[in-house]
Every structure is written in structure tokens, then in C-alpha cells.
Amino acid sequence: MAGAILVQNTTWAQAARAVAALDDHRLLSPKAICQTSPEFLGELIRSAGTYRIKTRRLKALASHVQTGGGLRKLRHQPTERLRAGLLAVDGIGPETADAILLYAFDRPVFVADAYARRILQRIHADPCPPTAANYAHYRGRVEACDFGVAELNEFHALLVEHGKRCCRARALCGACVAVAGCRFTGSPD
């Protein structure tokens, strides 16, 4: 859950260093995060960037988990109720909430991040622009395929990797394994 906050607007490598620092200080539980001073927490997560904002968000999420009865109690909530609660936490939007649902709570939801939206729009020539405003459109299209948690987890990870390597804002179609079936025609290559 902390990783989903810490990776916002940065790379996973940067966020992973911050997660490791929290782990080294045994600060990966909601109770520990709530009890830690914002200054100390901020220093530990500085590598993830925007550490003041992320400190507030981590504390807000930790407080939400604690006031919700802890992780065990939250695990028993229906997915939509759990998602609504996460979305009510300061700094948690649809992408972060869905990442927490998929990776921390093992719920079958799709994380329609920028990589996923771009790739799906290009491959399917979807007329819906791959903007954050159309997050629900892309999330719904994938979830309609009725994938399980493990499949959604793997699919999202593969889309992120493919987006980093080939399907960038300026596409590298010559290196793409899906080029034969892709409907993207705006490639500069």
C-alpha cells in the first residue's frame, strides 16, 4: 500500500528505495506510520520525491486503515466499498486505489495507468483518448474480460514493461512484438 503512494509521479526504483527505508525502520504498518513524526517519515521517503505530500498521503492512508478497523477488517469489505473508502483518502485517486486493491487486497481490478491506456488505445485503435479522464473506460474494457487476480497482476506488469520499452509517447514500433496486430498508424518509425 505504501508503494502505491510512493510511486506516484516517480519511477518504481525511486519508490522502492523509500519502501526499503521504511522497512529498515519497521515503519510499514499503519500504526507505525501514524506514530512516526512527519519530519522523520519525510526524510525516509525523500528518494521517492515530493516527500512532504507523500508523507501526508501515507499518514492519511495509515489513519484510514486504522479507523477502518485494520487490514483484516478491511479485507472483508466488498470491493466497491473498499474502493470508495480508498478514494475518500486524501491523495488517492483511481489508479492508486486500484493498485492497492489489486496488489494489496488481491481484488480483480485493472490498473488502467498511462502505459495501459496508451497501449490499449493504440492496439485497438480505440477512439477514446488515453487520458486520465477516460480511466474508467479502459478499466472497464479489461475488467469485462473476466480475468482473475493473478492474470490482471501479470497483464498490468507486462503492459508497464512494454510501455517503457516500446510503446512510449513516441513509439518504437520496430522493437514491438505486437506490431503485426497493432492498429496504431501514427508511428514515426
Image (cartoon, helix red, strand yellow):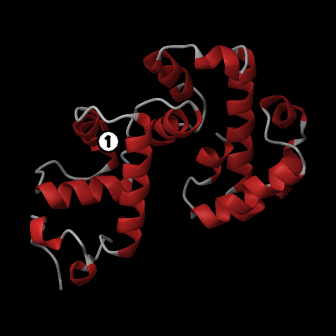
Q: Quadrant of residue 121?
A: bottom left
**Location of mark 1 (residue):** 135
Quarter containing the N terminus = top right
Q: Is residue 16 above or below residue 95?
A: below
Total labels drawn: 1
Residue 171 horizontal side relative to residue 72, left or right: left
Of residue 10 and residue 179, the one placed in the foreground of this image is: 179
Task: State the residue at coordinates (32%, 36%).
Answer: 147
Quarter containing the C terminus = bottom left
Q: Is residue 59 above or below residue 26?
A: above
Q: Which amino acid, by three-letter code, is at mark 1?
A: Tyr
Of residue 181 and residue 53, the one placed in the foreground of this image is: 181
Horizontal and vertical percent for residue 142? Answer: 26, 40
Task: State the residue at coordinates (24%, 38%).
Answer: 137
Q: Is residue 106 above or below residue 75?
A: below
Residue 176 horizontal side relative to residue 74, left or right: left
Horizontal and vertical percent for residue 102? Answer: 49, 36
Residue 34 horizontal side relative to residue 121, left or right: right
Mark 1: secondary structure: helix
Q: Is residue 159 visible?
A: yes
Q: Quadrant of residue 174?
A: bottom left
Q: Is residue 49 visible?
A: no
How busy is the neighbourhood of tag 1: few (under 14 within 10 Å), some, or many (20 plus)?
some
Horizontal and vertical percent for residue 59? Answer: 75, 35
Horizontal and vertical percent for residue 118? Answer: 27, 59
Q: Quadrant of residue 140?
A: top left
Q: Is residue 78 above or below residue 173?
A: above
Task: State the residue at coordinates (39%, 59%).
Answer: 158
